[in-house]
Image (spheres, rainbow, N blue to C red):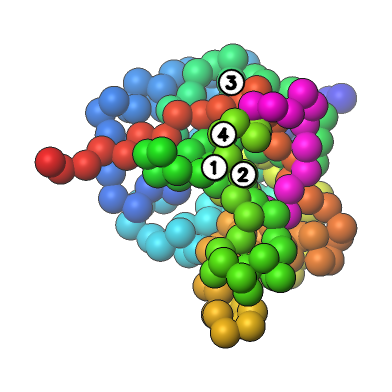
Amino acid sequence: YLYKRGYMKYAFCIPIYNTISGHLLPQFLNLQEWCPQLDGKIYTILGKTHVDARNWLCTDGGGFFNPRKLIDKVDYLVWIDSDQSFNYQQLITLLEFDSPFCSGWYIKTLGGTAMIADWNEEDFKKQGYMNFWTESKIRAQKEPFEVDYCGFGFTKVSTEILKQMEYPYFRQRMVDIGKYTENCSEDVTFCLDVKDKLGIKPTILPQLKINHLKEIYI
């Protein structure tokens, strides 16, 4: 359909806490070049905590005064964390998948689990953590599947979802579960809030594994 003047299909939201690795800078320069053909624009912010950065980005700095400043002129927010490594085909796979809320996946730490999980409080009481998916379990899936929450390292969200939510769209939720208190991060809390209010869960694309760069000092 024809877009209104100033209207776009995608806002590529890239929170940067401190720096972007030189290993990943070329892909973001490529993304800048791809934006015109994708009908999108890059939005980024430096030096804010995760929750503040996401709220700033999804409102283009509008905050409480103008929380719909960005979502009223774009169809989708595409979240790409500054430590994720991706290529053009992976981006197109995410953009073209027909879903209001979908995501690729990535491993949290070396030899660890993926940043996608199912919320099960009974299991949490026994083990002190939620049921995160392993790489082998994800790769065994033949079709896209829903989970209760995912990390926002490579995620697409329809702005129609945010239009039905209250600002701040991102916040942190403290949950008491048995003898434990779970401090839910801003992306986890967003997923839980959307599920509770709208009945929508993120859909994971099992073929869409993104590399997670974690540079360490030895």
Along the viewing direction, whichever of 76 and 63 lies nearer the viewer: 76
Earlier in the chain: of badge 2 and badge 3, it is 3
Mark 2 to mark 3 CA distance (whole Å): 21 Å
Mark 1 to mark 4 CA distance (whole Å): 6 Å
Could you classify mark 3 by the number of other residues whose Cα lies within 10 Å: few (under 14), some (14-19), or many (20 or more)? Answer: some
Picture coordinates of residue 185, whole percent (x, y): 53, 64
Q: Is 118 above or below relative to 6?
A: below
Tell us which disc is closer to us: 3 or 4. Answer: 4
> Is 20 displayed left or right of 8 in the figure?
left
Q: Which residue has dot 3 on it?
A: 90
Earlier in the chain: of badge 3 and badge 1, it is 3
Tell me the quadrant of the picture where the N terminus can be found: top right
Q: Which residue has dot 2 on it?
A: 133
Q: Residue at x 56, y 34 (%)?
A: 135
Along the viewing direction, whichever of 28 and 99 lies nearer the viewer: 99
Q: Is 180 above or below relative to 83?
A: below
Give the residues in magenta: 139-149
Q: Which residue has dot 1 on it?
A: 114
Q: Pointer 1 and pointer 4: residues touching (CB < 8 Å)?
A: yes
Mark 3 to mark 1 CA distance (whole Å): 17 Å
Could you classify mark 1 by the number of other residues whose Cα lies within 10 Å: few (under 14), some (14-19), or many (20 or more)? Answer: many
Report which quarter residue 65 is drawn in.
Answer: bottom right
Q: Pointer 3 and pointer 1: residues touching (CB < 8 Å)?
A: no
Q: Residue at x 65, y 23 (%)?
A: 207
Tell us which disc is closer to us: 2 or 3. Answer: 2
Q: Which residue has dot 4 on it?
A: 135
Picture coordinates of residue 142, whole percent (x, y): 77, 23
Amino acid type shown at disc 2: Trp
